Image (cartoon, rainbow, N blue to C red):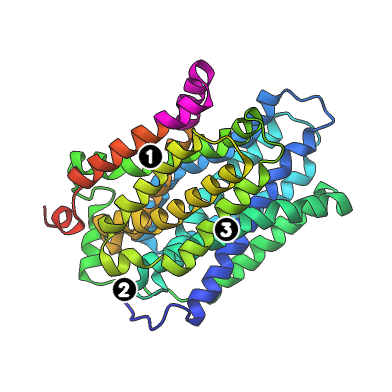
Amino acid sequence: MTQIKGLWNRDFIIALVGYFSLFMSISLFFIFPLFFEHMNVPKGRIGMIMGVHSLMAIFIRPFFGRLIDIRGRKKISLFGIAFLIFTVPFFHFINDAGVLPIILRALTGIGWGISMTATITICSDLAPVSRLAKSMGIIGVAGLLSIALGPLLAEELVNIFGFGGLYNASLLFLVISFVCIVLTKEVIELNNNYQNIKSQGFHLGIPLFAVLMISSLPMLHGAVRGAVSYFIALYGKSIPLERVGPFFVFFSLAAILTRIFFGDLSDRYGRKKIIFPAACIIGFNLFLVSQVHSFWMFILTGFIGGLGQGLLFPALSTYVIDVFGRENKGFALSLYLTFFDVGMGVGAVFFGWISDYYGYRTMYLTAGAIFLLVSLLFLWKAPSPNVVQNE
């Protein structure tokens, strides 16, 4: 592997702009349901159109995650972005909620699942090995900014140019992303160790129990994140609070600031030494959320939740990379993202069921208790990276 000097090197910045542009192209579609607003389309149908994107991304990631390590990060990233560039123009032909939007959203999900994982891997490759968690935190900030800015830009584009302007802007961001990735260098060099990994194909020889322990916390993290993302607005209105938007603002602000200033803590002190305290912050904050009775307490829980999220993501994602080995980074990241996304989906159903029967406060108490218990189990039983790699 080529030695990288300094986090903010030229190639890292170019690749980061590529990732941000890729994420922007997708986040513009967050307001796509508004396209069907005046068509009397059933909400379930709209949910299917939007949800098939995530389902296809979850399905495709593990397969292409391994190919990222075998065939090369840059080649797979460019393939995924080119796939999106080919697909997006066909959105101009949508005029109803029939089969075409479902097919196109499924195709963009495939392209997103391929390109996102490969591009994150490229960005992290271009940072010093000793700053891996820090780089993952910065990459996460780029994603958070695109989530915040994408829908705002999309609204303006639709108001001025209609949805055709949204599709064209998405295509422009994809072209920018493609050019940025072309301009970055591939820093993973084929050597004997890499060829051995290549010959193993999709089998890495990690014990099943170890995989179960490794996956437990990312999945539960996704589940409780879903409980917050999908239900916090409804919970806030039930208290009742007039405004719930500031919760998300302070959550994002805390997550961004934490990743920028403290994203390298696990690089310095070790992954588990940061993962468990960060998980405790999230778990105890869920208890605090269940006791909210005022607007300012609501805002405080948003800030604390963002603080925990900002600490946990860089440490936990790099822990998974450490376990599977840096030479299998693409596969490790694809698994981590898959665990998290599956957790969000399952958690939305499970915690929604609890809220239906017992209310939102009990739901958040339950989420906090389960998350803390799984965090303790993870601390106790999840293997250290060197132990797994030596087995």
Point out the tag, 2 or 1, that comes first from the N-terminus: 2
Query: In the picture, which quadrant includes the N terminus?
Result: bottom left
The reply to whether residue 12 is visible in this rendering is yes
- Mark 2 to mark 3 CA distance (whole Å): 26 Å
Q: Amino acid at mark 3?
A: Leu
Lateral position of residue 31 relative to residue 277, left or right: right
Percent position of residue 306, x then y: 50, 52
Instruction: Give SS at disc 3.
Output: helix
Instruction: Give SS at disc 2.
Output: helix
Q: Residue at x 51, y 81 (%)?
A: 10
Lateral position of residue 82 relative to residue 169, left or right: left
Q: Nearer the viewer, residue 173 or 245?
A: 245
Q: Nearer the viewer, mark 2 or mark 3?
A: 3
Q: Residue at x 41, y 54 (%)?
A: 313
Residue indicated by mark 3: 253
Q: Amino acid at mark 2?
A: Ser
Residue indicated by mark 1: 219
Percent position of residue 87, x then y: 66, 49
User: What residue range appears in magenta?
Assistant: 346-366
Q: Residue 130 shows which numbered tag?
A: 2
Q: Residue at x 74, y 45 (%)?
A: 91
Figure check: 319 above or below 132: above
- Mark 1 to mark 3 CA distance (whole Å): 24 Å
Q: Residue 268 shows which numbered tag?
A: none
- Mark 2 to mark 1 CA distance (whole Å): 26 Å
Q: Amino acid at mark 1?
A: Met
Instruction: Give SS at disc 1.
Output: helix
Q: Is residue 349 magenta?
A: yes
- Badge 1 crowding class, 10 Å Cα cut-off, few under 14, some 14 to 19, many 20 or more, is many
Percent position of residue 74, x then y: 46, 66
